[in-house]
Image (cartoon, rainbow, N blue to C red):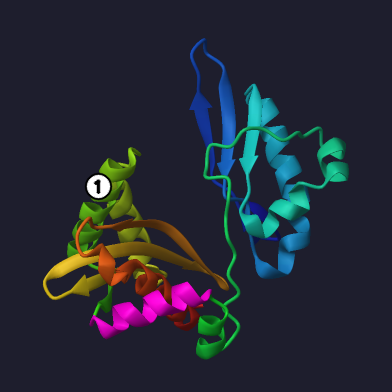
Amino acid sequence: ALAKHQDILGLAQVVELRHRGGSRTSYLARGPVMRPDTKEQTGFFVQHLSGLARIDHNLDFLIEPSPLIEAELNQPAYLGQNKLKTAPRLQPGRSILVDLAPTKQELLDSFKSKTRYNIRLATKKQVQITEQTSHQGLDQLWDLLQTTAQRQGIKNYPKDYYRTLLDSFSPLDCISILLAKHEQDILAGLLLIYYQNTAFYLFGGTASIKRELMANYLLHYEAMLLSLIHI
């Protein structure tokens, strides 16, 4: 934690990765998390964390900041001053930031015509979007994640990982599971986490049936509208 007179300014969760041969890497993913009024202290905090990693005799300190602060830390002058360099990522390397400030109609108008068509098609076909924060909703999302992973040849986290996310963030009212349903079939789902003025779309999956209903398009649009309420 970065604190001043017992006032918390920022937090970071640093994980120690152990490698074959005994070497270790300190790893900071999607952080540090700073209070909105203390973001100018981000560089100082990262420098301090790097020093702590050296004290612990770790070989490397790997930082993968959130897109909200990455531009600040990725400046050549800052990298050189703090003896940092770019490195291959462990987390997905691309994030898309969508401005949710426009009105509902302006947001819809900003999409490509084909996207708008698919959203209206799903609505016309009576695809329903529901919000869940229950373990039952998580089980339904998990089934979609597994189906998607098998179809695309990728791996998911263990189910307990998602359950821990839900149990940790539900009491804070900053997590949602959204499901797209048609009749008795669950066609698509995603998980959102809200922090400050940003909604983070972390995980999503789709079923292999009724794909012609374009449920995923409506799901993502409704997720943006729901995010406006939470942030």
- Residue 184 location, quadrant: bottom left
x and y percent of residue 190 in the render? 35, 62
Between 78 and 222, the residue placed more toward the observer is: 222
Between 212 and 30, the residue placed more toward the observer is: 212
Q: Which residue is pictured at 23% across the width and 57% down the height?
A: 207
Q: Find the magenta span and give its range.
A: 112-126
**Can see residue 97?**
yes
Residue sticking out furthest to the left: 184
Q: Which residue is pictured at 23% across the width and 82% down the height?
A: 126
Between 112 and 10, the residue placed more toward the observer is: 112
x and y percent of residue 1 in the render? 61, 51
x and y percent of residue 201 in the render? 45, 62
Q: Which residue is pictured at 68% across the width and 27% down the height?
A: 55
Q: Amino acid at mark 1?
A: Gln
Q: Which residue is mark 1?
A: 146
Between 158 and 114, the residue placed more toward the observer is: 114
Q: Is residue 125 magenta?
A: yes
Q: On the picture, is 224 further left or further right than 69?
A: left
Q: On the picture, is 113 further left or further right than 74?
A: left
Q: Is residue 28 magenta?
A: no
